[in-house]
Amino acid sequence: MHSPYAAAAHPGITMDRFTFVPHAQPTDGPGFVSQLRIDSGAGAARYQRLFTFTPVFESADGALAYAVDQASAWMQRKTLA
């Protein structure tokens, strides 16, 4: 059965050369996990990283909000570096 939330994603957040794309991924059981894809570069020099976080959320919205928070925290650390 295909879940309507399988592709639940935020449109993305761009900072400098990084694009953060939060996702809500349904689990095998009830709930959703947060995923955050970080893209940087272009063409052959393009890098993509995918982070999956361990908390399980009851809703896709909760999982997306958590991924957005993680992206915001990452951006904050990068601006302080």
Image (spheres, rainbow, N blue to C red):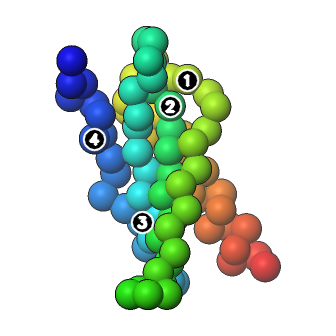
Q: Is residue 19 above or below residue 5?
A: below
Q: Which of the numbered marks, if any, corresponds to residue 56?
A: 1
The span from disc 3 to disc 2 (Cα, nearest Å) is 19 Å
Q: Which of the numbered marks, if any, corresponds to residue 7?
A: 4
Q: Amino acid at mark 2?
A: Val
Determine whether label 4 and label 3 are within 8 Å by CB.
Answer: no
Q: Amino acid at mark 3?
A: Ile
Find numbered disc 1 in the image and state the secondary structure of the residue it sits on. strand
In the image, which is nearer the foreground, mark 1 or mark 3? Answer: 1
Residue 1 rendering spot, x and y as whole percentages: 21, 18
In the image, which is nearer the foreground, mark 3 or mark 2? Answer: 2
Q: Which residue is mark 3?
A: 13
Neighbours of disc 4 within 10 Å: few (<14), some (14-19), many (20+)? few
The span from disc 1 to disc 2 (Cα, nearest Å) is 5 Å
From the viewer's perspective, is 61 left or right of 56?
left
Determine whether label 1 and label 2 are within 8 Å by CB.
Answer: yes
Q: Which residue is mark 2?
A: 33
Q: Is residue 61 above or below residue 71?
A: above
What residue is shown at x 50% (from left), y 23% (from top)? Answer: 57
Foreground of the two, 1 or 30: 1
In the image, which is nearer the foreground, mark 4 or mark 3? Answer: 4
Determine whether label 2 and label 4 are within 8 Å by CB.
Answer: no
